[in-house]
Amino acid sequence: MKSLVKIMPKKGVLDPQGKAIENSLKQLGFSQIKEVTQGKIIEIEIDSDNEKDAREILEKVSNKLLANLVIEDYEITFPKED
Amino acid sequence: MKISVIVFPGSNCDRDVSVSLKKFSNKDPFMVWHKETSLPDSDLIVLPGGFSYGDYLRCGSMAANSPIMKEVKKSSKNGSAVLGICNGFQILTESGLLPGTLIRNKGLSFLCKNTPLRVENNNSIFTKNYKDKDIINIPIAHNEGNYFASENVIKEIEDKNLVAFRYCNHNGDIDIANNPNGSLNNIAGIINENGNVLGMMPHPERATDKIAGLSDGEKFFTSIIESLK
């Protein structure tokens, strides 16, 4: 099944890339842009037939490798496949 | 004295640090490939600078899970000294051997320059040959050297005097103006509570020969080698 792990910088952690994007957008004249945060999305195809078991494994890999909990939070989702 | 230098794919300071270690210890370090599952008996293990795994995911995150790191952790628990320089420091935080983490430089630029550091704790095997508050000139070369940790962790590091080096100016002033990368409390290097693990972003191995410009790193290597003899 297909899964997504979304990893975002924790609130208050310096996010210079997000800030740079934000400043660029403002310079381009998009004055409505208030705040930009940059994270990453990792798409994982996992061999499992139910979300509960898959989530358990994905939490393990997120804690072990995908995210650094000192500076990042993660969120696991299972997008519906067409 | 037995020394191992771990070589990851993308390490690029492994040979430099090995030249410096040999210069002061008169012994060739073992060069240990990261895929090894056993480590030669070592008094000192060095994680060198570089760009292990091309800095994929987060600097040091893949290397922290390399097979050899299990052995490095085991040896450090048994009292071997572990030194991480630059990418090696990032690997130490990613593997949990040191607290906190290293994030992107505040100014977004890769920094490559000689930088004054103040010796904050000369009561360690890594720094004993320096005088307290010595100001030394050591090169930095990094993109992610901005030390970050939670408020509680920073407080603990400060309370227990675990900061080894801080960025400063030539007078030893420690403030935002003399902080190259945005590091909390100008932290350039820290020691663990047991005193046997040190991580630092600056490169002492690039300051061990006057012919190459700088020699303030000499006392760093003589400290370790004399301590572990």
Image (spheres, coloured by chain):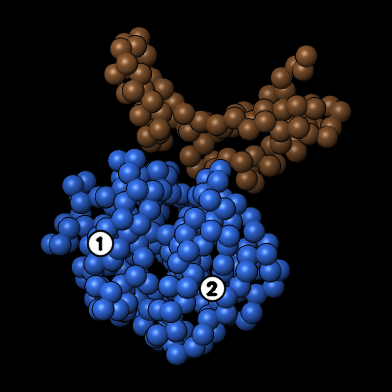
Chain colours: A brown, B blue
**Quadrant housing residue B206:** bottom left
Tell me how far mark 1 sits from mark 2, CA to CA. Answer: 24 Å
The image quadrant where one finds the N terminus of chain A is: top right
Q: In this view, which residue lies farthest toward the top? A: A32
Question: In the depicted view, which residue is nearer to us: A6 or B141?
Answer: B141
Q: In the rendered view, would you say A20 is above or below B215?
A: above
Q: Is residue B147 visible?
A: no
Q: Chain of mark 2?
A: B
Task: Give the amino acid type for the residue marked by disc 1 in the picture.
Answer: Asn
Circle 1 sits in a helix, a strand or a loop, which is it?
strand
Circles 1 and 2: CB atoms closer than 8 Å: no
Pick out the residue farthest to the right: A49
Which residue type carries mark 2? Val
Nearer the observer, B67 or B192: B67
Residue at 75% x, 26% y is: A2
Is residue B36 positioned above or below A9 on the image? below
Residue located 53% across and 81% down the image: B29
Residue pictured at 71% horizontal, 68% vertical: B37
Q: Quadrant of the C terminus of chain A?
A: top right
Query: Which residue, given by chain and number where applicable, does mark 2 sit on?
Result: B5
Q: Which residue is mark 1?
A: B114
Vertical position of residue A51 compared to residue B9: above or below: above
Packing grade of label 2 (10 A; few <14, some 14-19, many >=20) is many
**Is A3 on the left or on the right of A20, as rendered?**
right
Q: Secondary structure at mark 2?
A: strand
Residue B41 placement: quadrant: bottom right
Q: Horizontal and vertical percent for residue A59?
A: 69, 37
Q: How many badges with numbers are in the image?
A: 2
In percent of width and height, residue B3 lies at 53, 80
- Residue B31 sits in which quadrant? bottom right
Q: Chain of mark 1?
A: B
